Image (tube, rainbow, N blue to C red):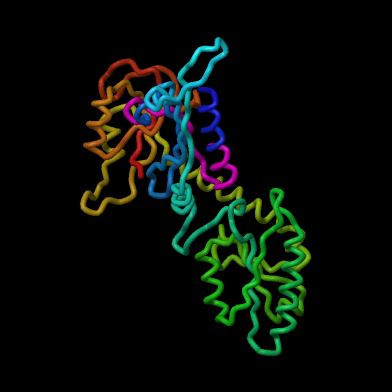
């Protein structure tokens, strides 16, 4: 059981620290538990349409599966016993979580800690005679940036030498979500500066920095992007995490105003709950919502209260949400 709990703590740290996606950790109710498991632990993320994604689960299977599969071992008392087993893992759904948590109307935004390329350098060469000096400056800058490290790895830099218009190349890298774009043109070459743009900011928000300053500060810039993405996601999640204490308020929260073309609505609803599996299924059919988890955070779970559906005493709050 303890090893199972530890795995979803690993998920929680990975999503927060690497993907910049805040999650709520907790245990699934019996209705949402993995079939055959004694306990299922989960981390739940909120994406930009306010729906939940089950970003990772770990299951304590007890001896149920080992008995079915005949998995035995010889114990300390030299007797054959059925194994106690666990099951855990994450999948490609984390890619979808990342896309839906951070992207904007211009395309993907990648947190630097998982970005395949940290910095792309875009040579701006309006005339043929500019090509040699500018490409040389780009190569020099790429080498200096690559010599820096970010969380223990060399900073990954790419110089885009393709014979394409500057605007086309720039927007292509914006859509790919590369954290930092650096342009070097003839004027930059003369002044010893670069034009730097962060993907977590508007494409128009360029910083004109001395090349030396850009190299010295690149690690701080990348960490700043990583932190800003997490802060933005936490603020969005918390803004749409609501305590609800009545069924009237609950139904209103999860019902779009325009049922024919539903607007973005809902979020995470923290409610006192003492319903049955049948009650959960009825709400699922009515509003397409499920109990995402029983939060492990005592502050979020709160104290005892009254179930919003049955009126029975409830030990604490659970999180309801619409989900993928």
Residue at far top of view? 77
Q: What is the quadrant of residue 159 in the picture? A: bottom right
Residue that appears at 44% across and 62% down: 105
User: 253 or 32: nearer the eye?
Assistant: 32
In the depicted structure, whether residue 201 falls above or below residue 170:
above
Whether 26 is drawn above or below 215: the answer is above
Q: Is residue 314 above or below residue 117?
A: above
319 drawn magenta: no
Question: Which residue is pictured at 35% across the width and 24% down the height?
Answer: 272
Residue at x 67%, y 64% (from the top left corner): 157
Q: On the rendered image, what quadrant is the C terminus found in?
A: top left
Out of 71 and 304, give the one closest to the viewer: 71
Please indicate whether residue 159 sits to the left or right of residue 263 in the image.
right
Drawn side of residue 78 relative to residue 150, left or right: left
Residue 158 screen position, x and y as percent: 65, 67
The location of residue 107, given as percent across then percent down, is 47, 62
């Amino acid at each position: 059981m303890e090893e199972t709990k530890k795995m979803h703590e690993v998920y929680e740290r990975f999503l927060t620290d690497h993907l910049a996606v805040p999650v709520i950790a907790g245990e699934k109710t019996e209705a949402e538990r993995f079939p055959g498991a004694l306990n299922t632990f989960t981390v739940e993320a909120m994406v930009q349409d306010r729906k939940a994604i089950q970003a990772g689960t770990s299951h304590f299977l007890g001896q149920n599966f080992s008995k079915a599969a005949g998995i035995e071992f010889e114990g300390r008392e030299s007797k054959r016993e059925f194994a106690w087993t666990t099951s855990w893992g994450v999948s490609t759904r984390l890619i979808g979580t990342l896309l839906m948590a951070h992207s904007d109307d211009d395309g993907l935004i990648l947190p630097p800690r998982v970005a395949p390329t940290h910095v792309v350098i875009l040579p701006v060469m309006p005339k043929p005679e500019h090509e040699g000096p500018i490409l040389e400056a780009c190569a020099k800058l790429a080498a200096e940036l690559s010599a820096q490290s970010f969380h223990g790895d060399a900073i990954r830099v790419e110089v885009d030498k393709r014979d394409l218009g500057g605007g086309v190349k720039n927007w292509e890298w914006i859509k790919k979500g590369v954290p930092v774009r650096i342009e070097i043109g003839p004027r930059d070459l003369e002044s010893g500066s670069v034009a730097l743009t962060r993907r977590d900011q508007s494409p128009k928000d360029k910083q004109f920095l001395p090349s030396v300053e850009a190299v010295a500060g690149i690690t701080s810039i990348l960490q700043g992007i990583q932190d800003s993405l997490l802060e933005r996601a936490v603020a969005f999640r918390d803004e749409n995490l609501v305590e609800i204490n009545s069924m009237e308020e609950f139904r209103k929260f999860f019902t779009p105003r325009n049922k024919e073309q539903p607007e973005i609505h809902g979020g995470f609803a923290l409610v006192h709950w003492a319903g049955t599996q049948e009650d959960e299924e009825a709400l699922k059919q009515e509003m397409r919502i499920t109990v995402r988890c029983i939060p492990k955070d005592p502050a979020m779970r709160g104290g005892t209260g009254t179930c919003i559906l049955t009126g029975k005493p409830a030990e604490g709050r659970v999180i309801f949400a619409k989900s993928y």
